[in-house]
Amino acid sequence: MNKFSAIILFIVSLFIISAHQPYTKLPKKYTAQEKWVDSVYTNMTLKERLGQLFTIGAYANKGLAADNRIKQQIMKYNVGGVLFLGGNPTHQVELTNQFQNLSKIPLLISMDAEFGLGNQLDSLPTYPHNMMLGAIQNNYLIEQIGQRIGEQSKRLGIHVNFAPNTAVHSFKTSVAGNRSFGESENNVTEKTLAFHKGMQKSGVVACAKYFPSMGNKSLDAAATFPELNISEEYIENVDLYPYRNLINNNIEAIMTGHVQVPNIEPIDGLSASLSYNVVTKILKEEFGYNGLIFSAKLNDKRLTANEKPGDVELAAFLAGNDILLLPGELPQVLQKFEEAIMVGLIKEERLAYSVKKILAAKYKHGLFTAEPIKEDSILIDLQLIKDDLLHRKAIKHAITAVKVNDSILPIQNLDKQKIAYVKMGDANESTFINTLRKYAAVDIIKGKNLADLVERLSNYSTVIIGFHKSDASSTEDYQFTDKEIVWLQEVARTNTVILDVFASPYSLNKVKSFTNIDNIIVSYQNSDASQEISAQIIFGALKAEGKLPVRIKNDFPLSTGIVTQQLSRLGYDLPETVGVSSVKLKRIDSLAELVVSEKMAPGVQLLIARRGKVIYNKNFGYHTYKKKQKVTDSDIYDVASMTKILATLPMVMKQEENKNLALNSKLVDLLPKFKGTNKEKLKVVEILSHYARLKPWIPFYVNTLDSITKKPDKKWYSNKKSEKYSIKVAKNLYMNAEYKDSIMQRIIDSDLLKRKRYKYSDLPFYILKDYIEASYKTDLNKLTQHYFYKSLGAHYTTYNPLEKFSKKMIVPSEIDDYYRNQTLQGYVHDMGAAMQGGIGGHAGLFSNANDVAKIMQMYLQGGTYGNVKYFDAATIAKFNNCYYCHKDNRRGVGFDKPQLGDVGPTCGCVSMNSFGHSGFTGTYTWADPDEDIVYVFLSNRTYPTMSNRKLIKTDIRTKIQKLIYEAIED
């Protein structure tokens, strides 16, 4: 041995020879466990007993040769355990069964699954790092996570999990990084106890680490161990505080750490894991700990450099460890131990003490009758929906609002906002951006230099700065660059800022001043779930609840955390959070895929929300059958007659609430032009209930076609815009403005149906649009934007979408060969709406599923959304009422309602309080107050031709609706 190794063995030998070891005596009652342990121990050879002390490392992805080497070691050296270090979960189960089958004495299988099995194994997720969990105020969540990691470990055949990490993050230079629960010894203790309790419930050994602490980064981390160079009093009151509590709560195992503790261990450079003073004097004697003690990994190059084989392992054992992790070459190590026994350095009592503890642990965890691990369905069993639910719940409770300006966070008054996003850091931010854009228009702004960036941001009301750092490692670099700090401070000086940190809260220590940073959120990690949930907090769909587990300079003390306001906006979550089965809901995928494969429509946007949470938001297929552009969340569809309840009806409701009209108002009272006509006495309630004898529709465009060519007549159309031809009907097609009045006149002059009965008609919405625009002296597009869409955050909803959006974002609705003679993409499909410049009361609106859901959710919430009141609940109820059901007319006032018999617009499984509408282009939306459900189906079934009626004939939209209700489990 060289230098300090010789000193180690000499001093430790003196301690071993002179000190009386606290060997465990058998209890008075000789239990089955003791009988088994004694029987096995008695029948073991010395080599077999020594083998039990060692846990060797194995990978489940290194190939057959590596697997065979481990098998040889198990058979030849009778090792006590295997520590899996990585690989594939399926192969790990196979190997575990093979290893156990080859071992004479059952193996104790272990893994470092500190944050979950995904720590080491591919294809499996992890739970949040401890730093994030440290922000959670509900410790039962930590217990649940510990229990679930334990259950997953047990399913994989693991008996010992090297967790929880018990380090108190005392210093900025601590090597613990995000692996610590924080700076408060009380918080760390509460969290580790909760985690331990959960693991214990699962039947897996929780092994607290690293005793006595992890220490601070050394100047030469490659050559020396971290150092805990602080007073004994501090170590006692802070670092050792969690261990005392864990021991009092019967923690089954503790791992010693590779850390230097000069005030406890005088030998320079000696790891605590090899220190008799640390392991035996403090842990075993002072603390009275009799559980399993694991050494830290002994293949650490800082230990083994220039050492003789077996010296490090022997030092670790003599220090007081029971199980020696990752020893060197076993033949030489075992020889060294045999020599130590021969010369009396290791006493029989000492060996028996550790080996019997190891055997007792194996008995306790059922290894004496161990059955092979079930190998099939392992990936399914390890990735249950409850894991996702628990993971997300932890994040919701952890994300911390450190600084809040109530007038800014959560973002309100969307109609007055112009929001920019600026990225900092080097990790991906796409989920954050995509989720922010579900709530409002958010522009990504970059600058060539700082001055350019500040200039580009000058017109924005709010700037969201996302700082994104990698989650690849819990100790990954989390710092802002010097350039980012300068840019952050200047942007904050000139703008209203929300800073969201997807990294360690310690990253904020580099910020020079927080004065100008109006709002600060710490989201801790850059996972997709953290990004999505944090974006929801920014817009008030969720509230921030966490508290800082660390200090940030002198600005933000421990436990800083502001509970933010929650607004009545749609959130995004898993189905089970609102009593719906995700497995059953997945059956909808098959029907949506059938729509595409059977060419009922080129593509589909589907959204389902319940209790204010979007639980299903998927896209299928393409814009066209050429399959060049897949449907995405942000694509915009022509919603056709859904315009009636998404645009015209809310304006009518507003007029009714403002006492400008009543349901019993007659048309002549609204529009004097109806005086003396056959329609003057028709009431609003009648026409909106489709119970006024109005014709279903009038093909206005036919009279504007050339009688011979059937092309747009040059009298009425031009391919160039002018004062005369000012109404844009489609690309390069403008209608004579004179014809606009002819549309209303034809409606006025039209005959009424002979019999009063339910007959669906577009005409009421032509009439009411005319009334609304006359009342407000502006068009319906501007009105709906002003009163509804902007403040709702429905920024994808508009008439004439080409004025706001790229053509690529708009799904084509038809290849028109009868009127406009072109592909309709961004121009309304409905001919009558096109002749009104794209702005119809009955059709013309474009939107996406998410925006439609916001409007329907507003109705469902009694007229309120995002804490903005649009209507009284009584107004919604008044219009969502069937006034002529007794006349066999199911319709509400503008809204469609469920069928009164067997056939109708729904699956027949919705409540009679539900309402919605469908659209000619293949669209559908429905809301049910009783089940608190919103359903949106958007497609372009009319592409390439509206003669395709497969979607209608198969009732796919209502079959999907039926599956939604069948998936409800509460």
Image (spheres, rainbow, N blue to C red):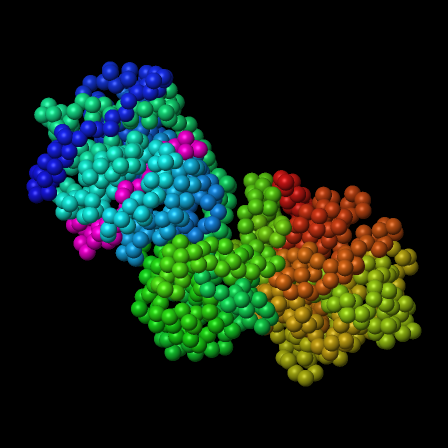
Give the quadrant of residue 709: bottom right
- Residue 152: in sight, yes or no? no
* Tag count: 0
The residue lying toward the viewer, choosing from 118 and 377, is: 118
Residue at horizontal 28 percent and vertical 42 percent from the top: 211
**Is residue 571 rendered to the left or right of residue 134?**
right
Q: In which quarter of the image is residue 95?
A: top left
Is residue 228 shown in magenta? yes
Q: Which residue occupies 37% across, 26% down? A: 365
Q: Where is residue 484 in the image (x, y as percent from the top left)?
A: 35, 68
Q: Residue 97, relative to residue 273: is it above or below?
A: above
Residue 296, x across and y down, in percent:
24, 39
Q: Decide: is 157 above or below 269.
A: above
Q: What stretch is highlighted in magenta?
A: 200-229
Question: What residue is at 55 percent from the left and 69 percent from the top?
Answer: 407
Please tell me which residue is depicted at 62% across the width and 49% down the height of the picture: 610
Indicate the position of residue 328 as horizontal and vertical percent values: 17, 35
Q: Could you say which quadrant of the image residue 740 lies in?
A: bottom right
Instruction: Establish if 371 lies above or below 114.
Output: above
The quarter of the rendered structure image containing the N terminus is top left
Report if residue 286 is visible in the image.
Answer: yes
**Camera-side residue of 495 and 98:** 495
Quick one: which residue is furthest to the left in this view? 2
558 versus 316 height, above or below: below
Q: Position of residue 386 (x, y in %)?
A: 50, 41
* Image quarter of the C terminus: top right
In the image, residue 204 lies in the stretch drawn in magenta:
yes
Q: Specify whether 626 is left or right of 888.
A: left
User: Taken as a whole, is the magenta stretch helix, strand or loop?
Assistant: loop
Q: In this view, does 888 lie to the left or right of 93?
A: right
